[in-house]
Image (cartoon, rainbow, N blue to C red):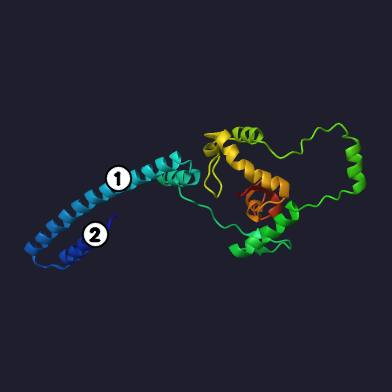
Amino acid sequence: MSEEIWDKIEERRLTKAKMLGEADITRRQVLNRKYEALNKVITKRAKEDKKNFYDALASEAEKAANNTDMKTLFAVTRTLSGQKNNARNIPVEDENGVLVNLKQEQLLVWKKYFESTLNSVFATTEDNLTSQRRHNINRQINTEPPTVMEISSAISSLKKDNSPSSDGLAVECFQLDPQLMATKLLSIFNKLWLTESITLSWKESVIVKILKKGDQKICSNWRASYFFLP
C-alpha cells in the first residue's frame, strides 16, 4: 500500500480514538461520519493499490518469460499464486552422530560429506591403461581442434527450456543462430583445446542436495545434484 493510505489509516485510528473518548453526542456523530468516510477511502485505495501491485507482478512475469529468466518467473508465479517459501532449517548429523543446528555449521558438515563422496579417486595403474589400449586398437578418435560445424551441431542439440546459469544466458539465445554463435566461440574453444587449460570460474559448480528417502538428518539419505557455472 502507498504512503498516502498509511497516513489515512493513522488518521482513521486517531479519529476513532477521539470518537470513543468524546462525551458530547453531536461531536461524536461528526467524528463517526469522518471515521466512516476515511474507512471508505482506505478500502477503495487499498483495492486500487492491490490491483496495481498484481498488475506490476504480471508485467514482471511477462518480461521474465520473454527474457527466459526462469528464476524470476517462478518467484513471481509463487507470489501471484499465494505460495510461500515454507522451507525450514532441518538439523543434520555430523560424522559423529551429533546434531548440528546452526546453518553455517551445517554447511561445513555438508561440505565434508560431499567432499568424501564426490571426490572419489580410482586407482589406475599404467599396466591397466596399456591393457585397455591393446583392447581398443581400432579406435577412431579425432584429436583435432573442434570445427564450426561441430560446435554448431552441439549447440543445436542442447536441451531447451532450462533455466540459465549465473551468466543469465539461456540455451535459446545460442540456438537463434547456431552457426553465428559457433563462429564466435571457435577461437575460445581452440585456445582451450591447444593450451589444455580452462579458467578457474569454469571449474566452479553449485551443489543441490536432494532427499532420496529416510531420515532427513542423515547425510547419506541425500544425493547431490550439481551444475557447473559458466
Q: Residue furthest left?
A: 26
Camera-side residue of 202 and 191: 191
- Label 2 crowding class (10 Å Cα cut-off): few <14, some 14-19, many 20+? some
According to the picture, the residue beneath numbered tag 2 turns out to be 9
Q: Amino acid at mark 1?
A: Lys
Camera-side residue of 208 and 103: 208
Q: Amino acid at mark 2?
A: Ile
**N-term-proximal mark, 1 vs 2:** 2
Residue 29: quadrant of the picture:
bottom left
Q: Residue at x 93, y 46 (%)?
A: 127
* Dot label at residue 169: none
Q: Residue at x 37, y 43 (%)?
A: 59
Q: Seen in the image, is 159 located left or right of residue 8?
A: right
Q: Seen in the image, is 6 located left or right of residue 18?
A: right
181 relative to 20, above or below: above
Q: Position of residue 118 (x, y in %)?
A: 73, 52
Q: Position of residue 149 (x, y in %)?
A: 64, 32
Q: Residue at x 19, y 51 (%)?
A: 40
Q: Secondary structure at mark 2?
A: helix
- Would residue 213 be visible to someone looking at this image? no
Say how many tags the image has.
Answer: 2
Quadrant placement of the N terminus: bottom left
Residue 146: quadrant of the picture:
top right
Q: Secondary structure at mark 1?
A: helix
According to the picture, the residue beneath numbered tag 1 turns out to be 51
What is the distance, in whole Å, between disc 1 and disc 2 at their CAs? 19 Å
Q: Position of residue 2 (x, y in %)?
A: 28, 56
Camera-side residue of 44 and 21: 44
Camera-side residue of 192 and 56: 192
Q: Position of residue 6 (x, y in %)?
A: 26, 59
